């Protein structure tokens, strides 16, 4: 079923209904305003999207999809079976209380903080963004250590980085972090030759590397390389923390490298990994002290299927969803409107034009579109999050 209609066809529909020519730029802006109203009123089946949360027991905060709709009901389940009906296989030595764990439950952030249940989730507004917080699921905390950052063996500094030292006062895990300074440079580079090669072949498809950084001055980006050697590696450029926050100059930063989003340089096999490199890039020459890095680990996360309502109604010719129609005359983007609703939606978009021109059809169009909006609002209500409930 084709859910989308191209802007070109929709604009022609507007002109056909109106019976006269219309200013295209004005109609794009007006249609975007109607889409804004529509997304606030309803959660349509056509707005449902599916994403994956790479869940690891030790992690808690996860970045929600860019098009996640705040007021939308969400569903979270493991990728092998639906959470509410799944039958777990329990190990003989598994603590008995875990056998009461049946499915993910959503709580207010305050209740979530008490960790009173297993498979516990919440959505918390933090630093201007909503985060999905998870805890106590069935994933374990197994990992492959790349470096504990408890020794300087194998580490070298480049770019403007220097003064490598072990720091026992500020650390995330273990005994130390690695401290370094930056002097009048736009890049700080740390290269690590892993003393004993590690095998990361099982991590290539969906594995993650997480590490901790202290950033007295925030870089514009962080590049991470991991691979067989300095010619054959996976690389990714990162511009935010793992949970989507901007880099923090006051607190600890958790940085995530995802093999799924990385690109290859050369022909890495990852069966004998010896090369790790991190590059901090700055927009201008920077001098600062006490940059730190700690606890570099590779994880194989559990994939949680995350179903949610998107507030994106428009799709580009490249298949990328976005919030609004780009205000460009002649755009070939698609609007996500069900076929049976396109005509009444077009009439809704024409109301202002009809009223302005004194067109006698205004009253009938208004009555028809108002009835339609009430009907779909009742049929597909905006399911606001209900605090204290097991579902939102």
Image: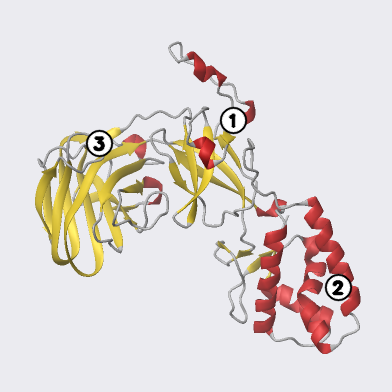
Q: Badge 3, how many Cα within 10 Å: few under 14, some, many 20+?
A: some
How did the renderer colour the structure? secondary structure
Q: Which residue is mark 2?
A: 366
Mark 1 sits on what residue? 81
Q: Is residue 342 visible?
A: yes
Contact flag, marks 1 and 2 (Cβ < 8 Å)? no
From this view, report whether residue 107 is shown above or below residue 313.
above
Q: Is residue 304 left or right of residue 375?
A: left
Q: Is residue 329 left or right of residue 20?
A: left
Among the two numbered marks 3 and 1 on one chain, the one whose residue lies closer to the N terminus? 1
Q: First in sequence, mark 1 or 2: give its number.
A: 1
N-terminal of the pair, mark 3 or mark 2, is 3
Question: For the residues marked 3 and 1, what is the alpha-carbon distance in whole angstroms?
Answer: 35 Å
Neighbor class of circle 1 (other Cα within 10 Å; few <14, some 14-19, many 20+) is few
Q: Nearer the viewer, mark 1 or mark 2?
A: 2
According to the picture, the residue beneath numbered tag 3 turns out to be 173
């Amino acid at each position: 079923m084709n859910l989308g209609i191209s802007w070109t066809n929709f604009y022609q529909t507007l002109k056909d209904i109106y019976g006269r020519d219309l200013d295209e730029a004005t109609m794009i802006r007006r249609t975007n305003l109607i889409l804004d109203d529509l997304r606030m009123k309803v959660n349509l089946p056509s707005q449902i999207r599916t994403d994956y949360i790479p869940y690891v027991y030790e992690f808690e905060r996860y970045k929600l999809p860019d098009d996640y709709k705040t007021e939308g009901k969400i569903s979270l389940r493991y990728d092998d079976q639906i959470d509410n009906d799944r039958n777990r296989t329990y190990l003989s030595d598994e603590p008995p209380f875990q056998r009461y764990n049946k499915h993910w439950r959503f709580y207010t952030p305050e209740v979530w903080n008490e960790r009173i249940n297993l498979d516990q989730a919440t959505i918390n507004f933090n630093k201007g963004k909503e985060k999905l917080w998870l805890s106590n699921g069935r994933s374990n905390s197994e990992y492959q250590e790349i470096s504990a950052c408890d020794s300087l063996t194998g580490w070298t500094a480049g770019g403007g980085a220097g003064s490598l030292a072990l720091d026992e006062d500020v650390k995330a895990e273990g005994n130390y972090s690695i401290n370094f300074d930056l002097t009048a440079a736009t890049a700080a580079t740390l290269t690590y030759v892993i003393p004993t090669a590690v095998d990361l072949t099982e991590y290539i498809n969906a594995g993650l590397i997480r590490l901790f950084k202290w950033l007295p001055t925030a870089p514009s980006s962080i590049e991470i390389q991991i691979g067989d050697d300095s010619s054959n590696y996976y690389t990714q450029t990162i511009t935010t923390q793992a949970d989507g926050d901007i880099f923090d100059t006051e607190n600890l930063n958790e940085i995530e490298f995802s093999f799924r989003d990385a690109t290859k340089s050369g022909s890495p096999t990852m069966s004998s990994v010896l090369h790790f490199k991190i590059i901090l890039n700055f927009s201008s020459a920077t001098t600062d002290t006490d940059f730190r890095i700690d606890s570099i680990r590779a994880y194989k996360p559990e994939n949680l299927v995350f179903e949610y309502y998107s507030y994106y109604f428009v799709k580009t010719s490249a298949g990328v969803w976005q919030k609004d129609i780009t205000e460009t005359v002649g755009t070939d983007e698609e609007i996500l409107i069900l076929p049976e609703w396109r005509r009444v939606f077009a009439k809704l978009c024409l109301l202002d034009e009809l009223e302005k021109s004194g067109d006698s059809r205004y009253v009938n169009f208004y009555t028809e579109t108002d009835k339609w909006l009430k009907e779909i609002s009742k049929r597909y209500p905006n399911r606001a999050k209900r605090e204290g409930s097991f579902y939102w």
